[in-house]
Image (tube, helix red, strand yellow):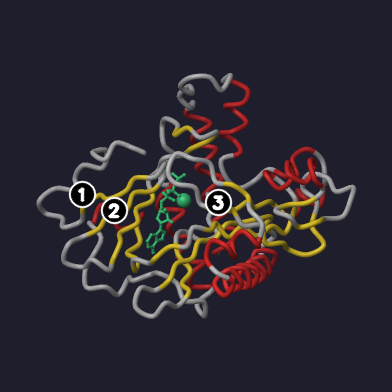
Amino acid sequence: MNDAGADAGVNDAASAWTLTYSGKVRDLYVRADEPQLVLMVASDRVSAFDHVLEPGIPSKGALLTQLSKWWFAQLADMPNHLADAADVDAPAELADRSMIVKRLEMYPVECVVRGYLSGSGWLEYQESQSVCGIALPAGLSDGDRLPEPIYTPAWKAPMGEHDENISFERTVELVGAEVATALRDASLDIFARASAIAETRGVILADTKFEFGADPETGALVLADEVLTSDSSRYWDAELYAAGGPGRLASFDKQIVRNWLSANWDKQGVPPELPADIVEQTAARYRELIQRLTA
Ligand code: ATP
Ligand code: MG
């Protein structure tokens, strides 16, 4: 949770938006005259190993917002939470890093889909040869492509707690069989389509996380949150991947930051400030992904 006063200027008398929630990276604002809307603002904050780092990455919030909106447009037949036609505007200084969205009743399930084995999936596989209860072939290595994409949901833990990988059966207990099935089917469908689009741009979508909510009026399933950004997804360069070698799993996100921190910090106490060249390389990486996907 970040200091609610950090984004001064939005809460001044000129703006009707009030800060209601501050995550590690994003801030949510609401307004009394349009209670069905939420303003989601992506900051430049970058987090790694559960710490928000200093300084932020210039333009990160705007770039990831642009990418999210681009993906929503590619997936236009899937109902999403964008409410850009609303009668109200975002404050001008936040316009490029924000989305006005319809306030949904969010499901407490992080809808993770993996086309490749890496990250927490790889860790779980080494223990059990399965991920979220899905049995996988023996002998897979970090970064290997899975026979087919798998749905590996996580329970969205309350603030401050870690999300927890769960089985599909557990999601049925949480949201009921009908919704659990709809979440899984929509997630796998969007993942397949997004992977195919990324592939034509020489980018591998290794895994991603979606969040959905229910429209409060109709109950319909709506795609929410950010979609297919490098904060919510693992993207690899297809050429590097095919070439093999140590760089093949370099992801299009804060890998540079993580690597630098691992080499320069013992993970105790407050992390050191990021040097300017690491900040610039990370910003360039975010720009490159957008360029590759959307150009
Ligand atoms: P962390 O800091 O670990 O990322 P977080 O996921 O709670 O925690 P954010 O992702 O920054 O932080 O917060 C965005 C919040 O907004 C999430 O709780 C998400 O579920 C919620 N959300 C996304 N879209 C909507 C929507 N249309 N209506 C209501 N809530 C939404
Ligand atoms: Mg989140």
Quarter of the image where the C terminus is located:
bottom right
Instruction: Name the residue rendered at 32%, 64% in the picture.
Output: 100
> What residue did someone put label 1 on?
10
Instruction: Name the residue rendered at 25%, 49% in the picture.
Output: 19
Q: Amino acid at mark 1?
A: Val
The quarter of the displayed image where residue 1 is located: top left
Q: Is residue 47 left or right of residue 1?
A: right
> What residue did someone put label 2 on?
94
| Disc with the residue nearer the chain's start (2 vs 3) | 2
Relative to 238, say whether 122 is above or below. Answer: above
Q: Residues within 10 Å of mark 2 (few under 14, many from 20)?
A: some
Where is residue 143? Give x, y as percent: 77, 48
Q: Amino acid at mark 3?
A: Ser
Q: CA distance from mark 1 to mark 2?
A: 9 Å
Where is residue 112? Give x, y as percent: 61, 57
Image marks 1 and 2: residues in contact by CB distance under 8 Å: yes
Where is residue 144? Give x, y as percent: 80, 51
* Secondary element at image label 2: helix
| Disc with the residue nearer the chain's start (3 vs 1) | 1
> What residue did someone put label 3 on?
230
Q: CA distance from mark 3 to mark 1?
A: 26 Å
Q: Residues within 10 Å of mark 3 (few under 14, many from 20)?
A: many
Ligand 1 - quadrant of the structure image: bottom left
Relative to 94, say whether 38 is above or below. Answer: below
| Disc with the residue nearer the chain's start (1 vs 2) | 1
Q: Amino acid at mark 2?
A: Leu
